Image (spheres, rainbow, N blue to C red):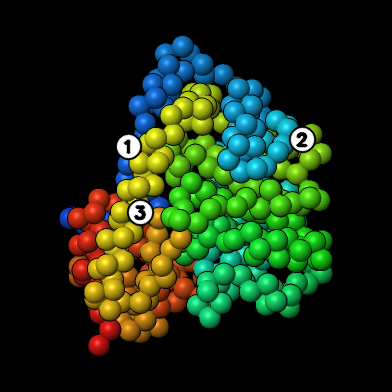
């Protein structure tokens, strides 16, 4: 057999999937490992999808998406994100996953570098490898409130650095970056003439803190924004997200979308339109469910004396298990799963800074979450 491209062989596997796959083979597992909303998709979204199929709306669409969906996203961005863009800047994608790959593919050539959060969402690093580029981690450390330390970013910049990825609300940390910090990151990017990719897929899930979109602060066209319907509307399997680009890229975007996906499945786009324009109460209800779970989880962790980062957004808890994991939290997570039937994500799956930590999903029925939290080993 001929060989695969060497950079493809370097794409790191996901440490979350590993736990997930073992868990799928066991019975009675408390599943707290993946970022999967545990609420149902709203009726009006299902109805719209069903209608699209029934009416045979199953053709190729424009590469950027059907016109009413793009128009609805433009209106949503202005209303909810204070981001004012033209339709040609909004590209409907196969989830945020393809939006990220598309944005990184536009900006990174072989050997280029992109700054990625550590701990951070695994796909940022995987995509850099896919493109034969380098992911350079920047630490989100406890000493710095789990936020980017902008001064510490400076020495990471080389003449190959092309972009920085920012993720707020953060997966896996649940931190939400305020406007002042986002402005400092933008100033940093401007100083070094870097692109910024802002992943905002958890935009609707914040608890007592407002979400600020980086693109709302961008005045010189350097921010690509990545959004998704997956988490917001509990439609992870429908695979719809969108990429919002700086101005002047529509011809290039049309070409690269054509090469990569042509377009998103048409029935999924009609479902997405119903989601974006429909009743937002299900989103508010989901947020309330995660917030209630968070409150209950906080209480249990405090009672049990476990250290954790109190999240302001997303639906994850970042919990310190370094007293038990002995320097190999990935192995510990597997052992813990087999012994206790509780599936959680090892922090090391999100980067080096995650060693000794685990990520627990709050998107689960409360009794399942409680069982998982009560099984965690406490410090001596
Ligand atoms: C930070 C972040 N970005 C992007 C994604 C991908 O989402 P999608 O389902 O829209 O591809 C996820 C999914 O977990 C995520 O956590």
Return the disc, 3 or 1, that comes first in the chain's sequence: 1
Q: Nearer the viewer, residue 343 or 316?
A: 316
Q: Residues within 10 Å of mark 2 (few under 14, many from 20)?
A: some
Pair 2/1: label in front: 1
Residue sitting at x 35%, y 77%: 307
**Circle 3 SS class:** helix
Spot the residue most to the front. 208
Q: Earlier in the sequence, mark 2 or mark 1?
A: 1
Disc number at residue 291? 3
Q: What distance separates the C-alpha of mark 3 from that of mark 1? A: 17 Å
> Badge 1 is on which residue?
40
Percent x, y of residue 208: 45, 56
State left or right for residue 98 relative to residue 231. right
N-terminal of the pair, mark 3 or mark 2, is: 2
Q: Is residue 194 left or right of residue 22?
A: right
* Along the viewing direction, whichever of 150 and 102 lies nearer the viewer: 150
Instruction: Establish whether ligand 1 lies closer than 8 Å to the Cβ of label 2.
Output: no
- For the residues marked 3 and 2, what is the alpha-carbon distance in whole angstroms? 39 Å
Is residue 107 among the parts visible in the rendering?
A: no
- For the point 70% across and 76% down, the residue is 151
Q: Is residue 263 left or right of residue 340?
A: right
Q: Residue at x 58, y 40 (%)?
A: 80
- Residue 269's place in the image compared with 337, above or below, is above
Percent position of residue 136, x then y: 65, 69
Secondary structure of residue under mark 1: loop
Q: In which quarter of the image is residue 30?
A: bottom left
Q: Which mark is residue 250?
A: 2
User: Can residue 221 be seen?
Assistant: yes
Measured along the vertical axis of the image, is residue 229 above or below residue 55? below
């Amino acid at each position: 057999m001929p060989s695969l491209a060497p950079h493809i062989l370097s794409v790191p596997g996901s440490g979350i999937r590993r736990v997930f796959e073992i868990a799928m083979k066991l019975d009675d597992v408390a599943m707290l490992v993946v970022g999967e909303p545990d609420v149902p998709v709203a009726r009006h979204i299902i109805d719209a999808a069903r209608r699209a199929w029934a009416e045979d709306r199953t053709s190729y669409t424009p590469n950027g998406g059907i016109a009413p969906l793009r128009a609805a996203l433009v209106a949503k961005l202005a209303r909810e994100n204070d981001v004012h863009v033209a339709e040609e800047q909004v590209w409907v994608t196969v989830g945020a996953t393809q939006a990220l790959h598309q944005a990184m593919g536009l900006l990174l050539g072989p050997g280029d570098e992109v700054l990625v959060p550590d701990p951070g969402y695994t796909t940022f690093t995987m995509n850099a490898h896919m493109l034969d580029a380098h992911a350079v981690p920047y630490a989100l450390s406890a000493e710095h409130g789990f936020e980017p330390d902008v001064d510490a970013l400076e020495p990471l910049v080389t003449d190959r650095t092309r972009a920085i990825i920012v993720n707020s609300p953060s997966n896996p940390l649940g931190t939400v970056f305020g406007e002042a910090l986002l402005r400092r990151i933008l100033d940093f990017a401007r100083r070094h003439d870097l692109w910024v990719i802002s992943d905002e897929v958890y935009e609707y899930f914040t608890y007592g803190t407002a979400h600020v979109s980086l693109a709302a602060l961008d005045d010189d066209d350097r921010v690509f924004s990545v959004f998704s319907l997956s988490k917001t509307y509990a439609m992870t399997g429908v695979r719809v997200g969108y990429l919002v680009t700086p101005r002047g890229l529509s011809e290039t975007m049309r070409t690269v979308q054509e090469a990569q996906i042509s377009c998103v499945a048409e029935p999924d786009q009609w479902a997405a339109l119903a989601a974006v324009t429909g009743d937002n109460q299900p989103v508010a209800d989901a947020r309330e469910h995660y917030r209630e779970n968070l409150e209950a989880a906080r209480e249990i962790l405090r009672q049990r004396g476990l250290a954790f980062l109190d999240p302001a957004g997303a639906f994850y808890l970042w919990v310190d298990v370094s007293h038990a994991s002995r320097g190999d939290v990935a192995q510990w997570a597997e052992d813990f799963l087999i012994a206790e039937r509780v599936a959680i994500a090892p922090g090391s799956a999100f980067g080096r800074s995650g060693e000794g930590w685990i990520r627990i999903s709050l998107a689960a029925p409360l009794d399942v979450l409680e069982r998982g939290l009560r099984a965690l080993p406490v410090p001596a």
